[in-house]
Amino acid sequence: MMRIPPALVLVLVLAAGGLGLHAQDSGWITWLREHHHPLRAQNAGAADDFADLQFLKPILEGRRIVQIGESHHSVAEYGAVKTRLIKFLHQEMGFDVLAFESSIYECHAADLRQLSATDALFSTIFGVWAFEEVLPLFEYLRQTQTSARPLAFAGFDPQISSRSGVATRPEFFRRVVGVLAPAYANEVATFDAQFIDRIQREGPEYARDEEDRLVAFYTRLAAFLETNRDALVDAFPGDASPLIAQRVAWSSVKLVQLLRSYANNPDDVSLQGHMAIRDSAMADNLTFLANELHPGKKIIVWAANIHVRHANTATTWVFPTMGTWLAERFRDELYTIGLYPNRGTVPGTRSVYSIDPAEPGTMERLLSDAGSSQLFVDLLHQSPGNGTRWMFEPMLSRDASISGPQAMLPVLIVPRDQYDGLLFIDRVSAPRFIGR
């Protein structure tokens, strides 16, 4: 097992001290012990007993978009707790859309009524979530499709997230475009099939070598679909395919630009240029979901902490991410939750990594001192005071590395500037991945 480099922790601790960060005091711990909301363990009691989550109703009142982050993608307990939160928000708080950090096309295209939970998972989301603790979410999604209130499933990433799911995309384009222009539809389907094949085989190098041609093609397609939107919508009554097709074409332009950025800057360990392209596209796609595809609907967002944070430029990562734009566009409707562990294990590229218990003075250590193995703390509705001062000042926290081995790395944040609430799990573990 590998551990967080002590030298890196020391550098950020010294940086935090230079920014005026103070060691946590007993008043903060006292406040947290009195004001946190303990969550029951996932294996305790009935699966749909939400008595411990009722506190969320007044906290989330009036909020239409709830973002639930995570410090690392592949964590067993994260899959379980987020699935339970999604069920509660759907069943008891009127949230009818789940938007996932995965392909906008694949998540839309999956027929959840016909696919098994396993097939639905593998044809929609990235493989980092292909583990047993996420499978109940897809079982639930499938069950709701025949209910009075189905939970709609959507994606917002411009990237391709599923090899099997994206295989239907060329024919999808052919069907939509073909209503108005059959010859152009055949051209689009042929081009898109080649694009998908070569992206999957060659990766960023293909996007770099063919960038101008690829961008020109998908820009033309997006413009065609936008110009003919009304006619296409009339041709597909009750079917969102024309709207999705336009976003997928637009997202393909962003995907080419993203992959070209990877190819041109393979050693950019900060990933700043790459993240700016991807996160701005994800923010625009989520805005599309909220304003056009599901107007008025209440939406749950599943994504990484780094993507949902409101002001990532103010952290030690120092580049903008999706949450910045969403906070600007939907602030009064938005509630963002950061999800953090204290200790345990997470999978890396080649091995399992150990997360040591958080150091004194860090946000996770403070949350662990509250005394509950799983807990929630509301930040949005608090005012500065002796017990709450910690959430308004710089504190060290930890997220997964954004490059290289997926170890946890320190990030300096002001909690209240980044999140509206914090979800904390004391001990986490590597998940049980599903074979395919």
Image (spheres, rainbow, N blue to C red):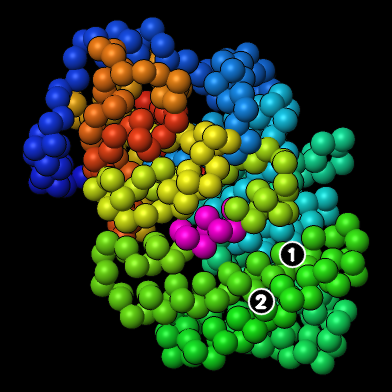
In the displayed structure image, the side of residue 61 where residue 41 appears, left or right: left
In the image, the segment drawn in magenta is 279-286
Tell me what residue is drawn at x 73 percent, y 84 percent: 189
In the displayed structure image, the side of residue 343 where residue 196 appears, left or right: right
Residue 281 is situated, as x and y percent measured from the top left of the image, at 52, 62
Residue 302 is situated, as x and y percent measured from the top left of the image, at 55, 44
Q: What's the CA distance linking mark 1 and mark 2?
A: 10 Å
Q: In what element is the residue under mark 2? A: helix
Please tell me whether residue 283 belongs to the stretch shown in magenta: yes
Instruction: Compare marks 1 and 2 and give the one earlier in the sequence.
Output: 2
Badge 1 density bin: few <14, some 14–19, many ≥20, Cα 10 Å:
some
Quick one: 348 or 372, which is closer to the camera?
372
Residue 43 is situated, as x and y percent measured from the top left of the image, at 57, 23
| Residue that mark 1 sits on | 243
| Residue that mark 2 sits on | 222
Residue 278 is situated, as x and y percent measured from the top left of the image, at 46, 63
Tell me what residue is drawn at x 83 percent, y 69 percent: 230
In the displayed structure image, the side of residue 243 where residue 384 appears, left or right: left
Rendered position, 116 above or below 159 = above
- What amino acid type is highlighted by mark number 1? Leu
Contact (CB < 8 A) between labels 1 and 2? Answer: no
The quarter in which the C terminus is drawn is bottom right
- What amino acid type is highlighted by mark number 2? Ala
Badge 2 density bin: few <14, some 14–19, many ≥20, Cα 10 Å:
many
Please tell me whether residue 218 belongs to the stretch shown in magenta: no
